Image (spheres, helix red, strand yellow):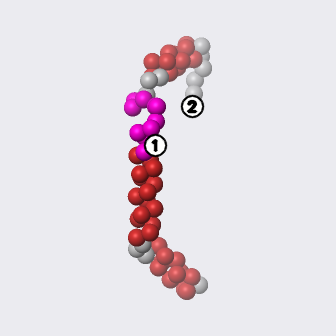
């Protein structure tokens, strides 16, 4: 058991190698590229409709939670 604990502790406190850092950088690049190509608005646009829906549901006696 002590050997397993030592192996686990070593794995948890090891440093990240350069390949892993390159993978992370590549994934961030994919996220940035996807954000630029996205047709989604920068901020939500459905807030008024959501508010209206909640008001209608609550006035009908429906609640959540």
Drawn side of residue 54 relative to residue 29, left or right: right
Q: Which of 21 and 60 is in front in this view?
A: 21
Going by the picture, which residue comes out furthest to the bottom?
3
Q: Place residue 15 in its image quadrant.
A: bottom left
Q: Which residue is drawn at 45% across and 18% down?
A: 48
> Where does the N terminus fall, quadrant-wise?
bottom right
- The first of marks 1 and 2 along the sequence is 1
* Residue contact between numbered discs 1 and 2, judged by CB atoms under 8 Å: no
Question: What residue sits 41% from the left and 65% below the top?
Answer: 21
Q: Residue at x 43, y 45 (%)?
A: 33
Residue 54 place in picture, x, y as percent: 52, 20
SS for tag 2? Answer: loop
Which residue is label 1 attached to? Answer: 34
The answer to whether residue 1 is magenta is no
- Residue 63 visible in the picture: yes
Residue identifier under label 2: 65
Q: Which residue is drawn at 57% across and 31% down?
A: 65
Q: Is residue 13 above or below residue 29?
A: below
Q: Position of residue 61 (x, y in %)?
A: 59, 16
Question: Position of 29 compared to 52: left or right?
Answer: left
Question: Under tag 1, what secondary structure?
Answer: helix
Label 1: how many residues lie within 10 Å, few (<14), some (14-19) or many (20+)?
A: few
x and y, in percent, of residue 4 in the image: 57, 82
**Residue range corresponding to the magenta coloring:** 33-43
Badge number at residue 53 = none
């Amino acid at each position: 058991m002590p050997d397993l604990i030592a192996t686990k502790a070593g794995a948890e406190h090891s440093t990240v190698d350069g390949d892993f850092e390159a993978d992370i950088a590549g994934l961030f690049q994919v996220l940035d590229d996807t954000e630029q190509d996205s047709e989604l608005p920068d901020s939500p646009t459905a807030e008024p409709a959501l508010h209206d829906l909640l008001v209608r549901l609550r006035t009908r006696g429906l609640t959540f939670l």
